[in-house]
Image (cartoon, rainbow, N blue to C red):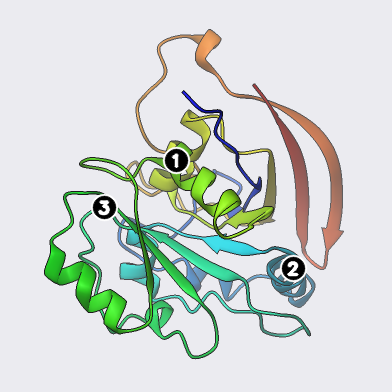
């Protein structure tokens, strides 16, 4: 089997003191992000401008209807990457307007041809990788080799974050700490997926940096595999 290549991957997220990403299941993260300091907002958009591509999951698009563009600072919009195994996201979602930024929709072979054709007709690049679900290691290889993506930022929800960490694809994590507690046993946290079986399965991190951006502390970690 050929060796797969991958971009350098930074996971970035706002997170509450109790590790939550939103106020509740199915609730937009934009509500929480309204309380982010201006300095932290600038950091988020500066980071987008520094990276070749940005990736979020299907649920984020459905709930937030994100644009994933650079605002507040000067810089090019990154290429947008949306993994969506069955190509069942709304065609009119903001991220599929390719006027200002190019978008890749990563689908599996199970995606219906008429859905794939509809996205292609909108100017979206459709990449097929995986049988029934998107194959993330293969997707990273395609982004690196075909699209020359050397640096990828993921602003994912718990499912995408878990898939990327599970496959050892994340290099760094940057957390923007929000000084709130929201609670909720089913409120989305940073990483979802399968529960680990023992401490040997924990993903180890090395703290690299901490800095205050207005009222938000930002921590940066290196992921140790």
Q: CA distance from mark 1 to mark 2?
A: 33 Å
Label 1 SS: helix
Q: Where does label 2 land, which residue? A: 40
Is label 1 or label 3 in front? 1
User: In front: 191, or 170?
Assistant: 170
Residue placed farthest to the front in the image? 2
Q: Position of residue 188 (x, y in %)?
A: 40, 48
Label 2 SS: helix
Q: Is residue 86 left or right of residue 141?
A: left
N-terminal-most mark, 2 or 3: 2
Is label 2 or label 3 in front? 3
N-terminal-most mark, 1 or 3: 3
Residue 187, above or below 23 = above
Q: Is residue 22 left or right of residue 130?
A: right
Q: Is residue 16 visible?
A: yes
Q: Position of residue 103 (x, y in %)?
A: 46, 72
Q: Is residue 13 visible?
A: no
Q: CA distance from mark 1 to mark 3?
A: 13 Å
Kindly identify the residue that appears in the image at 53 percent across and 43 percent down.
141
User: In front: 149, or 165?
Assistant: 149
Q: Where does label 3 land, which residue? A: 85
N-terminal-most mark, 1 or 2: 2
Q: Where does label 1 land, which residue? A: 138
Kindly identify the residue that appears in the image at 77 percent across and 68 percent down.
43
Q: Residues within 10 Å of mark 1 (few under 14, many from 20)?
A: some
Q: Residues within 10 Å of mark 3 (few under 14, many from 20)?
A: many
Q: CA distance from mark 2 to mark 3?
A: 32 Å
User: In front: 171, or 209?
Assistant: 171
Kindly identify the residue that appears in the image at 43 percent across and 47 percent down.
160
Residue 204, above or below 157 = above
Image quarter (top left, top right, bottom left or bottom right) of the C terminus? top right
Q: Position of residue 77 (x, y in %)?
A: 64, 78
């Amino acid at each position: 089997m050929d060796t797969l290549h991958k971009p350098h991957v930074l996971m970035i997220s706002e997170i509450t003191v109790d590790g939550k990403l939103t106020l509740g299941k199915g609730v937009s993260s934009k509500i929480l992000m309204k309380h982010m300091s201006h300095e932290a907002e600038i950091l988020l958009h500066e980071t987008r401008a520094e990276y070749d591509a940005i990736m979020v999951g299907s649920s984020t698009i459905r709930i937030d209807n994100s644009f994933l563009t650079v605002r507040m600072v000067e810089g090019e919009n990154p290429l947008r990457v949306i993994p969506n195994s069955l190509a069942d996201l709304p065609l009119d979602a903001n991220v599929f307007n390719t006027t200002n930024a190019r978008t890749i929709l990563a689908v599996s072979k199970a995606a219906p041809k008429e859905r794939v054709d509809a996205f292609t007709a909108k100017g979206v690049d459709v990449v097929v990788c995986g049988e029934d679900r998107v194959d993330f290691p293969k997707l990273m290889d395609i982004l690196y080799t075909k699209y020359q993506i050397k640096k990828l930022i993921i602003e994912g929800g718990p499912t995408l974050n878990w898939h990327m960490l599970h496959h050892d694809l994340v290099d760094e994590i940057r957390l923007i700490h929000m000084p709130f507690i929201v609670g909720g046993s089913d409120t989305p946290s940073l990483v979802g997926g399968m529960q680990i079986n023992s401490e040997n399965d924990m993903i180890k991190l090395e703290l690299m940096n901490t800095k205050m951006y207005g009222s938000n502390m930002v921590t940066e970690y290196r992921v140790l595999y």
